[in-house]
Amino acid sequence: MKKNVYLNRYALSGKIVCGECGRNFRRKTNYSAGRSYIAWSCIGHIEDKESCSMLFLRDGEIKATFTTMMNKLAFSNKLILEPLFKSISQIDEEIDRERMDAIDKRVEQLMEERNTLITLMAKGFLEPALFNQERNVLDSEMKNLTTEKTNLVTNSTSGVLRANEIKDLIDYVSADSFKGDYTEELLEEFVENIIVNSRDELTFNLKCGLSLKEKVVR
C-alpha cells in the first residue's frame, strides 16, 4: 500500500461531491443539544439553500458506510474483483496488441510505397503533381495511423494502471492483516470520489474504475 502524506487536510477533503448540484462538500463542526460533531455539508447548499436542497452528512456516517462497502468487497472478492482483474488484463492485452501489430505492418507498407514513389519521381517516371498527390495520400494515412497507435498506447497504459489498481485492492482485502476497520490511508488509497445521491445513499467511485452504491450507515 502506498504511503500518503496529509498536509493540513483530511482524507475526505475534496472527495465528496453533491449528486444534486455537483459542488464539493465542506467539513464543518455542527452543534446539537449542547454537543458538537463533525459533519460534511454541500457548499452549494451552504451558499444557497434554494438552489440545492442536499443536507449534511455526519463524518462518522460516511466513514461507516465506506467501511461497510470495503467489507462487502472483501467478502465477495473472488466473485467480483478477481474476475474483473482477469477480464481487464486479457481484453486490454489481446485487443491492443493485435491492432498495434496491424498498424505497424501497414506503416511499413506505406513507407515502402513512399520510397517507391520517390524512386519513380527521381527517374522521371512521375509528374510532380501526381507525385505530390500520391505522397500526400500516403502521408495522411501514416499520420492517422500514428495518431491511432499513440491513442492505443495511452489507453493500454490506462488499462494497465486500472488493472494494477484492482490488483492492489485485491491484495489489500484478501490479506490476513485486513481487519475491516476504517483508516484515512485506506480511503485515500482506493477512492477517487464519493457522490452523495441523497442523505440515504452514497456512490463510491474507486480508482480502479468500480462504482459502488451503498446505503448510508447510521
Image (spheres, rainbow, N blue to C red):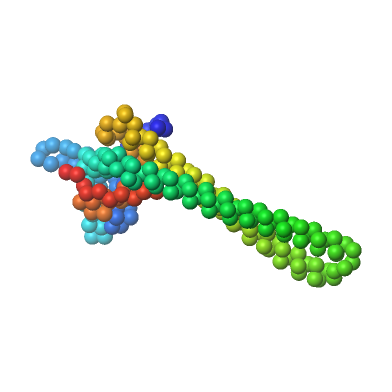
- Residue drawn 38% across the image and 35% down it: 171
Query: Total number of numbered labels?
Result: 0
Tell whether 95 sits left or right of 112.
left
Residue 97, horizontal then vertical, whole percent = 57, 50
* Residue 191 appears in the picture as rendered: no
Residue 164, horizontal then vertical, whole percent = 45, 40
- Residue drawn 47% across the image and 43% down it: 161
User: In terms of depth relative to the viewer, which is nearer, 42 or 192?
Assistant: 192
Residue 125, horizontal then vertical, whole percent = 87, 68
Q: Is residue 142 above or below residue 14?
A: below
Tell whether 161 sits left or right of 59.
right
Quarter of the image with the C terminus is: top left
Q: Residue furthest right?
A: 123
Quarter of the image with the N terminus is: top left
* Residue 111 appears in the picture as rendered: yes
Q: Is residue 197 above or below residue 137?
A: above
Residue 124, horizontal then vertical, whole percent = 89, 66
User: In terms of depth relative to the viewer, which is nearer, 217 or 24?
Assistant: 217
User: In terms of depth relative to the viewer, which is nearer, 151 or 82?
Assistant: 82
- Residue drawn 78% across the image and 67% down it: 132
- Residue drawn 67% across the image and 55% down it: 105
Q: Is residue 103 above or below residue 33?
A: below
Q: Residue furthest left?
A: 33
